[in-house]
Amino acid sequence: AQSVTQLGSHVSVSEGALVLLRCNYSSSVPPYLFWYVQYPNQGLQLLLKYTSAATLVKGINGFEAEFKKSETSFHLTKPSAHMSDAAEYFCAVSELDDYKLSFGAGTTVTVRA
Amino acid sequence: SAVISQKPSRDICQRGTSLTIQCQVDSQVTMMFWYRQQPGQSLTLIATANQGSEATYESGFVIDKFPISRPNLTFSTLTVSNMSPEDSSIYLCSVEHPTGVDGYEQYFGPGTRLTVT
């Protein structure tokens, strides 16, 4: 079964600084990978996804992620943090022929003024 | 994309009772999913619900505890039966949305926040 590991349960950044959230997956075959964001008391919103096309994926709100097969990673970045980026971020993985998502533990991002 | 609504948005229930959560999507979808998010934790898949067939449950979840209905392509319900405080969680439904050669996306409802006292 697929699994993902998110390094760092909490990340604190200054407004305007780089946001880097780490995600590693376990699979011998590159799966589908997703990043979701969850704002307080809300559902999950899809930020971006990797589905075997371009390895550098651009998403909404200025986020992007790079798929690195050699490192089995799919780290999420944003060059300049905004106060509105404060939320919980989840990395998720699914098999190519299976729509079920396995989620990482999540990373809480706080943004300092 | 798909717009998903859930009812109720939150509820406080007494132990031993049951609660049925509704999930409505604004377009026809083949696969619907139910997830649980326990306090401060990540999401765990409960079951997959396809229209016209019985739901498929993940390890650790059983039909007697979490019966699911899927009467048509836009609607599903999840019942949390004989509740205990350990069932206090956010329950989310999601739908699979094919995007052609680019794979698929999965969209989530706003969740139902359940507290069992």
Image: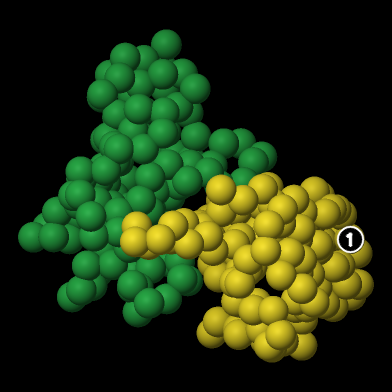
Chain colours: A green, B yellow
Q: Residue at 53% of width from left, 60% of height from top?
A: B97
Q: Quadrant of residue A30?
A: bottom left
Chain ID for label 1?
Answer: B
From what the image shows, is residue B83 above or below residue B58? above
From what the image shows, is residue A77 above or below residue A69? above
Residue A71 in the figure: left or right of residue A15? left
Which residue is outermost to the front?
B100
Q: Amino acid at mark 1?
A: Cys
Local packing at callout 1 (Cα closer than 10 Å; few below 14, some 14-19, many 20+) is some
Residue A29 in the figure: left or right of residue A61? left
Which residue is outermost to the left?
A70
Task: Answer whether residue A47 is visible to the viewer in this image.
Answer: yes
Q: Residue at 55% of width from left, 70% of height from top?
A: B45
x, y (%) of residue B108? 60, 53
x, y (%) of residue A71? 12, 57
* Quadrant (top left/top right/bottom left/bottom right) for the C terminus of chain A: top left
* Closer to the camera in the image, A78 or B19: A78
Q: Quadrant of residue B48?
A: bottom right
x, y (%) of residue B43? 53, 60
Q: Which residue is mark 1?
A: B13
* Closer to the camera in the image, B26 or B13: B26
Secondary structure, mark 1, is strand
Q: Residue at 69% of width from left, 88% of height from top?
A: B54
Task: Answer whether residue B111 is visible to the viewer in this image.
Answer: no
Q: Residue at 50% of width from left, 34% of height from top?
A: A87
